[in-house]
Image (cartoon, grey):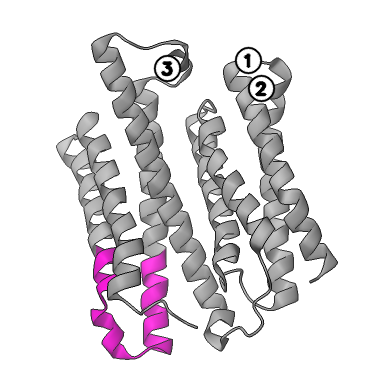
């Protein structure tokens, strides 16, 4: 394995661990140094991760999408990108400690178990497929984060109703901010999922048999897209907000998860390129 690739795989989990430590210090102790340093360190971690993806792609000649542990690293990257976008957009960093735990464990697992794939099928060397997978992962990562914010919204809502909330809930954003975070993540995810669907249809026409157009995986993805499109329309036109939108966000992600797991593994062979 290339020394440069191996170096990135070793240092990346440490960058994520340092980032989480700073966000944790800021959230639980309010340490000024941590508050000041956490976002710049997050940007540095993203920069290192982008460099890793570029170096790995150039040296190995394909996007990091040929094995489950390459995908794990890409998932870590996409979750971090989405969180960073929301933090910049909403100007609130209090949930970073909890969200960034996920990319840390994905990258740690990837760095420990990743190996070079000895024989990569030609289709997995397609740049178009690489962009399709990356945009899909960005979309699903954003929808997952939207669901997490929806879940935290509902937890905080019930704590407020019952007047039983302690220091932990006092440090979290209020209901309005949680709703804005979830809505921002939903828009991000919906946009990237739309891009992934368009790229996927182009790939379908170029590389696959037309019979794949009836594959259950495609129906699952389109159903997920339609549900989120309906939710965004209802919020903008019918004025849906609060608990109703949060429940819809969580429901949408459950359906997306069902599509990505059960339908993909049991009813479809569309994404099996080995």
Q: Which residue is mark 2?
A: 35
Q: Residue 152, position in %: x, y? A: 36, 29
Secondary structure under tag 3 reads: helix
Report the predominant secondary structure element of the magenta stretch.
helix
Q: Residue 173, position in %: x, y? A: 43, 21
Q: Report the residue at 53% width, 44% height from top.
A: 102
Instruction: Decide which of tag 2 and tag 1 comes sooner along the chain.
Output: 1
Find out whether residue 136 is within the magenta segment: no
The residues colored magenta run: 196-222
Q: Which residue is mark 1?
A: 30
Residue 74 position (above or below residue 131): above
Mark 2 Cα-neighbour bin, 10 Å: few <14, some 14–19, many ≥20: some
- Residue nearer the viewer, 161 or 38: 161
Residue 26 position (above or below residue 226): above
- Give the residue furthest to the top: 163
- Residue nearer the viewer, 128 or 262: 262
- Give the residue furthest to the right: 3
Q: CA distance from mark 2 to mark 3?
A: 19 Å
Q: Residue 86, position in %: x, y? A: 49, 38
Q: Residue 167, position in %: x, y? A: 47, 11
Q: Which residue is mark 3?
A: 169
Label pair 2/1, CB-CB below 8 angstroms: yes
Q: CA distance from mark 2 to mark 1?
A: 7 Å
């Amino acid at each position: 394995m290339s020394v440069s690739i191996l170096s990135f795989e070793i240092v990346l989990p440490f960058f994520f661990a340092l980032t989480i430590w700073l966000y944790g210090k800021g959230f639980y102790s309010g340490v000024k140094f941590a508050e000041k340093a956490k976002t710049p360190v997050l940007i540095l971690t993203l920069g290192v991760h982008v460099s890793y993806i570029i170096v790995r792609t150039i040296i190995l000649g394909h996007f990091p999408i040929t094995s489950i542990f390459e995908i794990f690293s890409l998932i870590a990257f996409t979750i971090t990108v989405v969180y960073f976008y929301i933090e910049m957009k909403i100007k609130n960093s209090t949930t970073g400690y909890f969200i960034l735990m996920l990319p840390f464990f994905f990258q740690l697992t990837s760095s420990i178990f990743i190996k070079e794939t000895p024989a990569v099928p030609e289709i997995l060397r397609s740049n178009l497929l690489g962009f399709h997978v990356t945009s899909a992962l960005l979309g699903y990562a954003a929808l997952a984060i939207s669901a997490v914010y929806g879940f935290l919204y509902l937890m905080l809502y019930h704590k407020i109703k019952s007047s039983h909330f302690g220091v932990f809930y006092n440090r979290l954003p209020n209901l309005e901010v949680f709703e804005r975070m979830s809505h921002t993540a939903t828009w991000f995810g919906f946009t990237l999922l739309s891009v992934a669907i368009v790229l996927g249809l182009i790939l379908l026409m170029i590389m696959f048999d037309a019979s794949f157009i009836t594959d259950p995986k495609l129906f699952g993805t389109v159903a997920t897209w339609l549900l989120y499109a309906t939710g965004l329309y209802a919020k903008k036109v019918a004025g849906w907000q609060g608990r109703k939108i949060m429940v819809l966000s969580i429901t949408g992600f459950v359906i997306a998860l069902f599509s990505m797991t059960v339908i993909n593994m049991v009813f479809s062979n569309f994404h099996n390129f080995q």
